Image (spheres, helix red, strand yellow):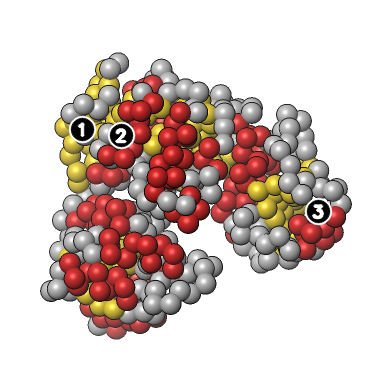
Amino acid sequence: MSAGPPDLGHPRRVHVVAAGGAGMSAIATVLAQAGHRVSGSDAAGSAALDRLRDLGVEVHVGHAAGHVEGAEFLVASTAVADDNVELVAARAAGVPVLRRIDLLPAFAAHQPFLSVAGTHGKTTTTSLLAVALRGAGEDPSFLVGAPVPALGGAAAHRPGRYFVLEADESDGSFLAGPRAGAVVTNVEPDHLEYWGGWAELQDGFRQFLASTDGPRVVCADDPSAAALGAEVGAATYGTAADATHRVVDLELGPHGSRFSLRSPGGTVPVDLPLPGLHNALDAAGALSLVAELGLDTAGAASALSGWDGVARRFERRGSAAGVEVVDDYAHLPTEVRAALAAGRSGGWRRVVAVFQPHRYSRTEALWQEFGGAFDDADLLVLTDLYPAGEAPRPGVTGKLLVDSVLAHEPRRALAWMPQLDDVVRYLVDVLRPGDLLMTVGAGDVTTVGDRVLEGLRAREGSA
């Protein structure tokens, strides 16, 4: 059975299913640090489970009905099927079974959310907001979609006034509240199978903004976000001339960006150690909400100079044989275009990109829009898609992107290599000093860079 948000105002006994996954591991971390007695299980051991064990979480490898014994409620990832033995045992014992969307309001009841939503840029903006708030003298709890070195992880419970949340529209959980503030980075068609259509997705974001009890900021450079923000009187940020918080004097370089944020309350300089216009805009969004909350924007901006990135967001993986390797989670056309533009700004001899499409549903819906997303790559390698648990769909493969790219630019230097093993061998052979290799996508393409670096070092050693 399902239940409403539990009262987390006093210690509770909680069991977390699939606790090794990124989302549930973060939930378990916050619960444990908040003083609750937490147990967790997953099908296999992992570093995430080891970290939970170090926090005092009772960790189980494998699922069993007995793991639920004594729990006051159970939290499970949406990826966990209803016939999981622990969910079945909980329901039989009358123990409430919650999903992430059910639990979030329980956190916000004690620390209202500062929620960051948008089709892309959420993880980076959320992490920047948490770091900026620390610089402004706050000490917020946070849930981010990837580990953040500057924050010591992807999640933490802290004693501050706010809870910084990467708010996910894919399942509607971004509507969880109460919210004391909100950022919308952009709004583009995605997760339409959940929402039912583009208009319905826009309605969801409209509700997200309208129901926020506090300042709202939206990106003025994104037409859809700006239009929705105008409907509810939200402040704006970006390079647009009419932005409430305007990015001026922007300088983009290979290792970061510099700009000034001109706000009604004054102008602050920003030195961000991450390249790309999209990352500068994410920093502007975080700082704009800090300003709208009436906090110390100068202190917040200063804190961002020490920010050292987020896993899989233009993450430098190393260099060998004169080749630098960067990994990026970008998996939507706009994200890919922005990531490669950041690579292009670095002055490398060539930008070599490997892209792995993500999900059958997303590829079927968006493959034609990928045609112009790779213009900043001198050499492009396309692989077959990463299914992310989805069942195959007739005619939907990574080859669709090959067709789209060549229709956009018939002379594009492109290699179609469905299998990652072939990609690694090919890259070790063709990469040369001065190249930037970017592995791009939300799937296991992230493993390619490290394997290529190994191959390049071996190539150097045998030369």
Where's residue 440, x and y in %?
34, 62
Q: Which mark is residue 226?
A: 2
How far apart marks 1 and 2 lie (CA) works out to: 11 Å
Q: Could you say whether the residue bearing mark 2 is in a helix, strand or loop?
A: helix
Q: Is residue 224 found left or right of 47 in the rendered image?
A: left
Quarter residue 36 falls in: top right
Q: Amino acid at mark 1?
A: Ala
Q: Which residue is mark 1?
A: 240
- First in residue order: circle 1 vs circle 2: 2
Residue at 50% x, 53% y is: 194
Lateral position of residue 261 relative to residue 75, left or right: left
Name the quadrant containing residue 35: top right
Q: Which mark is residue 90?
A: 3
Residue 309 is situated, as x and y percent measured from the top left of the image, at 39, 46
| Residue 51 appears in the rendering | no
Q: Earlier in the sequence, mark 3 or mark 2?
A: 3
Q: Nearer the viewer, residue 185 or 430?
A: 185
- Gap between marks 3 and 1 measured at Cα: 53 Å
Q: x and y percent of residue 313 in the render?
A: 37, 52
Q: Secondary structure at mark 3?
A: helix
Judged by depth in the image, the label closer to the viewer, 3 or 2, is 2
Are dots 1 and 2 in contact, CB under 8 Å? yes
CA neighbours of label 2 inside 10 A, class few (<14), some (14 to 19), many (20+): many
Which residue type does callout 3 highlight? Ala
The answer to whether the residue labelled 3 contacts the one labelled 2, judged by CB atoms less than 8 Å apart, is no
Give above or below for 403 relative to 342. below
Give the left or right position of residue 62, taking residue 435 as reference.
right
Above or below, 262 relative to 356: above
Q: Amino acid at mark 2?
A: Ala
Q: Which mark is residue 331?
A: none
